[in-house]
Structure formats: C-alpha cells, structure tokens
Image (cartoon, rainbow, N blue to C red):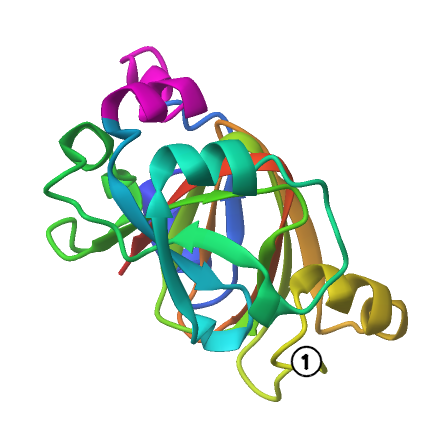
Amino acid sequence: LGREEFLREYWDRKPVIVEGWGANVGSGYLDVVSKEGLKRLYGNESIILSSANKNSYEKMTTSLTDYIDNYMSTPPVVRLGNTTWYHFGNNDHKSWPDVFKRYRIPDHYMPDPSFYAFSFGMGASGSGVPFHTHGGVFNEVFYGRKRWWLAPPGPEPSFHPDESAMQWLYTYYPTQQHNPLITECIIHPGEFIYVPSMWHHSTLNLGQTIFMATFL
C-alpha cells in the first residue's frame, strides 16, 4: 500500500489493514517486547492497569512481572469490564526506553511524522475494550491476535458501557453481526490496522496479546 493511495483512499475515509509491515522485525525489537524480554528489562517496574469498561475509569498499580505472571495468564472469563484489568496506556516512556525509542512508527503513512503519541499494551486472552472513539490511530500487533469491530462516525453501536468486549460478543453481537455498518477483522503479528478519527471500535484479544498504538 503506497503513501499516496493511503492518504487518498483511507486517511479520513475508512479503516485499512497493512500486511507484512515488518519494520520492527529483525531489529531485536520483538525480543524486547516479548513477555520474557519485558520481565528481564522492566520486571520490577510498576505499571498502571485500567479497567476494561468504556473510558477505563478505574486504575490500579502492580509490578510488570506480577501482571504478566498473574493477570495475563488468566483464562478467558465472561465478566464485567469494570472488574477486568488491562495494561494499555499510562506508560512510563522514560523508564522503558527500549520499548518506545526503538519502536519504528509507520511514518510512511503519516501526514506529519513529528506529531504522534504512543500507547503500549498487553492483555490476557479475552481482554479488550468496548466501543469508543478518539482521533486516528495505527495499532500494530507483535504477539497474539486482536479482533476488531468497527463502525463509521455517527450513532454508537449498541453496548453497555460497563460490559467487557467479551460480554458484548455474547450478548449484543448475535443481534449486530448482520448490521451493515459494523465491520470486523482480526489483526495478526506483523500487521497493523489504521482506524480514522472518530470511528467507533471495540477490541478483543485472542491469546495473550502485545501491541503498540500510535495516536495521531
């Protein structure tokens, strides 16, 4: 996918998946952001967890090692989003230089490569976030897979703000899966998705998932 085609067809129009990105493969970066690499480099560092309901209101703190060993290993369970804990955002960029300084952004597709913000994330299988909106974002998966549901700007898809993405899958999805406004896809390692500004989206991690979001 070329830059001009991306800006013309997708930038402010619709989501797109870029396959075979591979910019962070072969540089040792995947070793850094593996569970083992993160524990070796930053295992004793404190991280902030967010509840997995809309807007992630609740916060708690634990060590990175505790999160990887005890939260990410939890089997998928259908439960409320405000009782599901997830590490996404609230990152300490200065304390994790190998994660943030070595990451190669998808600058080929960015109108202004100097204007962006990172959010690094890790989640257990079955974790995720319900429908929400924000500015444009690139989201690259390093490990695991991430299932997405997307809908264009406008009326919000039906969901309860305190239900998790997995609960939505079992409660609302059966009535929404034929809704022509909702598109779904799965992002695999080495791929990224671009979601334009103010598109509604919800995510569900399939397997223990590690990823980076680049907000524009």
- Looking at the figure, which quarter contains the C terminus? bottom left
Q: Is residue 173 visible?
A: yes
What secondary structure do most residues of the magenta stretch adopt? helix
Give the magenta part as a residue range: 24-41
Answer with left or right where residue 128 lies relative to residue 22: right
Residue 202, given in percent of the width and then of the height, sits at 60, 64
Q: Residue at x 47, y 67 (%)?
A: 13
Residue 53, given in percent of the width and then of the height, sits at 55, 71
Answer with left or right where residue 141 lies relative to residue 104: right
175 up-or-down from 148: above or below: below
Answer with left or right where residue 24 lies relative to residue 201: left
* Image label count: 1
Queried whether the magenta region covers residue 84, the answer comes back as no
48 up-or-down from 97: above or below: below
Q: Residue at x 45, y 40 (%)?
A: 67
The front one of 206 and 84 is: 84
Dot 1 amino acid type: Pro
Residue bearing mark 1: 157
Q: Residue at x 45, y 71 (%)?
A: 56
Q: Secondary structure at mark 1?
A: loop
Residue 164, given in percent of the width and then of the height, sits at 66, 66
The front one of 173 and 59 is: 59
Give the quadrant of residue 128. Answer: bottom right
Residue 36, given in percent of the width and then of the height, sits at 41, 18
The front one of 18 and 50 is: 50
Q: Residue at x 31, y 48 (%)?
A: 47
- Looking at the figure, which quarter contains the N terminus? top left
Give the quadrant of residue 163. Answer: bottom right
70 up-or-down from 76: above or below: above
Give the quadrant of residue 81. Answer: bottom right
Q: Is residue 130 visible?
A: no
